Amino acid sequence: MSEQAGLSGARESYDITLPVRNYTPRHFLLEVKGKTATVTLNRPERKNPLTFSSYAELRDLFRALQFDDEVKTIVITGAGGNFCSGGDVFEIIQPLLSRDMPGLLQFTTMTGELVKAMRACPQPIIAAIDGICVGAGAIIAMASDMRIGTANAKVAFLFNKVGLAGCDMGACAILPRIIGQGRASELLYTGRVMKGEEAERWGFFNRLVETEAVLGEATKLAEELSAGPTFGNAMTKRMMHMEWDMSIDQAIEAEALAQAVCMKTEDYRRAFEAFANKETPVFEGN
């Protein structure tokens, strides 16, 4: 890929109209079943690396999902037994060598916009991770709300292995909040591989399952969340994100307001009526 091709790729945008179930991506797979959207990174012959174009299309998909009322949960996974091998060596890393500083900043800003879009999505995002999950792939997993992994998974934030800093796409802000400052420091300074059992022990994976079950377990969890009070779930995600920058007192006040809003939903009324009638509530997300 030429430098100019890479530059134009970073500037790409994709017009994704709602509902997203009608959208056919160019650079990955998308399936919406019921209330769950499944995104599959689909370059299995290369362990599903990202390109300028797939970064841009993923960013725009997650931006569109923010406004899709049909989708209540999102699963992201990779094809062929691997999650994602990060940025493609010849389609991203090599073209970046010939960019000037404004061009490099344009690229790094674009990649960060993907994480921003994922965190801004009201829907919980569940990553189903098997095999290789490194570089930008590890970042996508990190930016998800929950991660179901396998013992065969290999997670690495290997930016320093290519001469860069570990502070990529929000890693220094988000990763310590998942696994703690000391453990995050070790992974970001060394770029070493964290295998599946260690990832679960450190809290990066919510749980481990067998390889053949990883997507099914992630989907099952997504469906369980989709059957719950999805307005409340969206509020939980929003507050968890906002409260990173709040004091405890500010967080308590913000949660008081958020919970008061949720108490005006029909789902709250449904839960009371079901309890009073000794029934299981059927939530509708409003």
Image: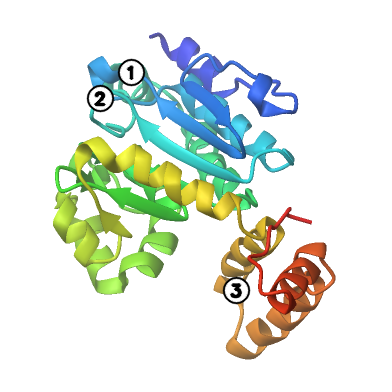
Q: Is residue 61 above or below residue 233?
A: above
User: In the rendered structure, which amino acid carries the disc numbered 3?
Assistant: Glu
Q: Is residue 244 left or right of residue 188?
A: right
What residue is shown at x 66% (from left), y 38% (from top)? Answer: 65
Do callouts 2 and 3 mark residues in contact (Cβ within 8 Å)? no
How many angstroms separate mark 3 from mark 1 (CA)? 37 Å
Q: Residues within 10 Å of mark 3 (few under 14, many from 20)?
A: some
Q: Nearer the viewer, residue 18 or 245?
A: 18
Question: What residue is drawn where x is 50% and y is 48%?
Answer: 222
Residue at the extreme right: 264
- Residue at 55% across / 46% down in the picture? 118
Q: Which residue is mark 1?
A: 43
Image coordinates of residue 278 in percent, x first then y, are 66, 74
Q: Which quadrant does the N terminus fall into? A: top left
- Say whether disc 2 or disc 3 marks the residue closer to the N-terminus: 2
Where is residue 197? Give x, y as percent.
Answer: 15, 57
Which amino acid type is marked by label 2?
Answer: Lys
Residue at the spot x=63%, y=46% of the render? 72
Q: Give x and y (percent) for residue 39.
A: 48, 31
> Which label was assigned to residue 47?
2
